[in-house]
Amino acid sequence: MKFRPCIDLHNGVVKQIVGSSLSDGYEPQTNFTAENSPAWFAKTYAADKLTGGHVIKLGPGNDDAAHKALAAWPGGLQIGGGITAENAAAWLQSGASKVIVTSWLFTNDEIDDLKLNQLVREIGKENIVIDLSCRIKDGRYHVVTNRWQTFSQTLVNGDTLNEMSHYASEFLIHGVDVEGKQAGIDQPLIEILATHSPIPCVYAGGISSINDLTKMQSIGNGRIDFTIGSALDLFGGSLPYREVVAFCD
């Protein structure tokens, strides 16, 4: 189980927000706004050799900040937010190790096979991370798109994970119902990922303590990597970054 750190960008600044509050025309619920630059965070993660973390652009106005983060650690970070088949290769050339795709893949609230195949042709599945972040509806986990506001018809289950593994080298999955709330992990979701995902998975949502990590390691059989946002002291929380790094070491 690996720690995959994050750099979430909103209006060009590193922030931690409650993702489900992000929508056009409204200020999101913000848990933390960093004084340090995106490049500072990238260099910090590089010094600790925390490969496979990600830079997420939360809306427009973040390209310049994202380029600076990637330049601070070429090949060390993935990039997500507004990724399409048209710009994916350019982000890889700018230093991203992989690209993370979500909303663009969907047409009429379902994953579009034509888009999936187009992206694989453009950059190869080894460079693709599919974001299947989800929320519970009618007792099932539905992938949510458009900044987590739209419920798709795609479910996070064994069938979806196996099918999508043919188009990606990893999954990134936020438990959106607990994300940003520091209220504990989504255990049933982690169980689904650990049981059914044939490729590496990164989980995010609700982690607030070392006890949560111990529980996740047990539930996920050590197979599911994780990222931590608002709870981390780097982002104003109470969970020491150094303790998390030491836990994984």
Image (cartoon, rainbow, N blue to C red):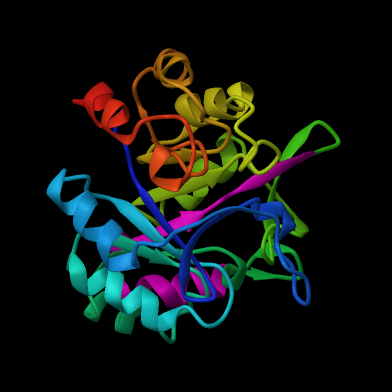
- Residue in the picture at 76% in, 60% down: 149
Residue located 25% across and 26% down the image: 248
- Location of residue 222 by image quarter: top left
Asked whether residue 167 appears in the rendered view, the answer is no
Q: Residue furthest right?
A: 138
Q: Quadrant of residue 189?
A: top right
- Return the x and y of residue 245 as percentages of the image width and height: 25, 31
Please determine whether, in this image, residue 156 is positioned above or below residue 113: above
Q: Quadrant where the C terminus lies?
A: top left
Point out residue 35 in the picture as x, y percentages from the top left corner.
41, 62
Residue in the image at 63% along x and 23% along y: 188
Residue lying furthest front: 35
Task: Examine the rendering and report whether any part of residue 78 can be seen.
Answer: yes
Q: Is residue 239 left or right of residue 60?
A: left
Q: Is residue 135 magenta?
A: yes
122 or 243: nearer the eye? Answer: 243
Q: How many marks?
A: 0
* Magenta residue span: 113-136
Left or right of 124? Residue 148 is right
Up the image or down, 211 lies above or below 124; here it is above
Depth check, front residue: 178 or 219: 178
Placement of the N terminus among the 4 image quadrants: top left
Residue 49 in picture, x, y percent from top left: 15, 45
Where residue 13 appears, as percent x and y from the top left, is 46, 69
Question: Is residue 65 a member of the stretch shown in magenta?
Answer: no
Q: Residue at x 49, y 52 (%)?
A: 164
Front in this rendered view, residue 157 or 103? 103
